[in-house]
Image: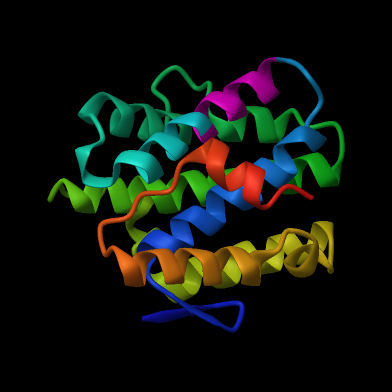
């Protein structure tokens, strides 16, 4: 089991923490195509969290296209057009979240990782990137977003039922700011 910001967490709990962080930062994005694109990507990431290995292949393909689209409209497209450094940082964090969950989804289906997801297989590296980027936006994010409480809740639920799944609405209600 790896550590996430000082908390011992499994891969699934890290994915839950990631989408919860995504929910906390997405609303900083200006309303428009970039926000809508990011919202859909986060929704598909939640789909994996809620279904885990039962996620559809088309959802995995969508996650991957958000990171490396053939038509050039992916997170990097919106990040490059960002109006300031905070918005750019948010897109970077959303890329990290989507890539981590994408890697977990691909591995869960016993598929080969695309090259752009290989670095997200390495747990420690991903966590460090995500934490560093969150610190650039808000040094107090860990406390504000209740990361420790979310991790403890997931851990307790998973101890009771190893196959527990976490629902988006339930998690947002439990941990709303």
Q: Give the residue displayed 49% in from the left and 65% down from the top.
A: 126
- Above or below, comparing residue 54 to residue 125 in the picture: above
**Does residue 164 appear to the left or right of 96 in the view shown?**
left
Instruction: Kindly tell me whether residue 62 is visible in this rendering.
Output: yes
- The residue lying furthest to the front in this view is 160
Count of all numbered marks drawn on residues in the image: 0
Q: Nearer the viewer, residue 63 or 72?
A: 63
Report whether 98 appears left or right of 21.
left
Query: Is residue 96 inside the magenta stretch?
Result: no
Residue drawn where x is 50% and y is 22% of the image: 72
Residue beneath the point at 66% across and 28% down? 78
In this rendering, is residue 23 above or below 44?
A: below
- Pick the quarter of the image with the N terminus: bottom left
The magenta segment is 33-42
* In the image, residue 27 above or below residue 126: above
- Seen in the picture, residue 175 relative to 162 is either above or below; the reply is above
Image quarter of residue 142: bottom right
Q: Is residue 115 visible?
A: no
Closer-to-camera residue (97/176) = 176
Mainly helix, strand or loop, the magenta region? helix
- The residue at the point 36 percent across, 51 percent down is 117
- How are the residues colored? rainbow
Q: Indicate the position of residue 4 as horizontal and vertical percent values.
A: 54, 75
Left or right for 11, reference 38: left
Whole-percent x, y for residue 107 in the image: 22, 53
Quarter occupied by residue 70: top left
Q: Could you tell me residue 60's position as x and y percent?
A: 30, 34
């Amino acid at each position: 089991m790896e550590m996430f910001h000082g908390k011992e967490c499994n891969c699934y709990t890290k994915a839950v923490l990631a989408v919860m962080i995504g929910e906390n930062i997405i609303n900083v994005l200006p309303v428009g195509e970039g926000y809508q694109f990011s919202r859909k990507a986060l929704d598909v990431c939640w789909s994996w969290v809620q279904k885990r290995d039962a996620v559809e292949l088309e959802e995995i393909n969508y996650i991957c296209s958000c990171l490396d689209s053939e038509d050039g409209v992916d997170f990097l497209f919106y990040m490059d057009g960002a109006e300031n450094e905070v918005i750019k940082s948010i897109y970077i964090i959303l890329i990290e979240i989507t890539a981590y969950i994408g890697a977990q989804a691909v591995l869960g289906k016993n598929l080969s990782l695309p090259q752009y997801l290989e670095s997200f297989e390495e747990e420690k590296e991903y966590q460090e990137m995500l934490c560093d980027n969150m610190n650039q936006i808000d040094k107090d994010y860990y406390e504000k977003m209740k990361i420790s409480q979310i991790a403890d809740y997931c851990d307790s639920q998973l101890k009771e039922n190893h196959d527990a799944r976490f629902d988006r609405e339930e998690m947002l209600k439990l941990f709303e700011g």
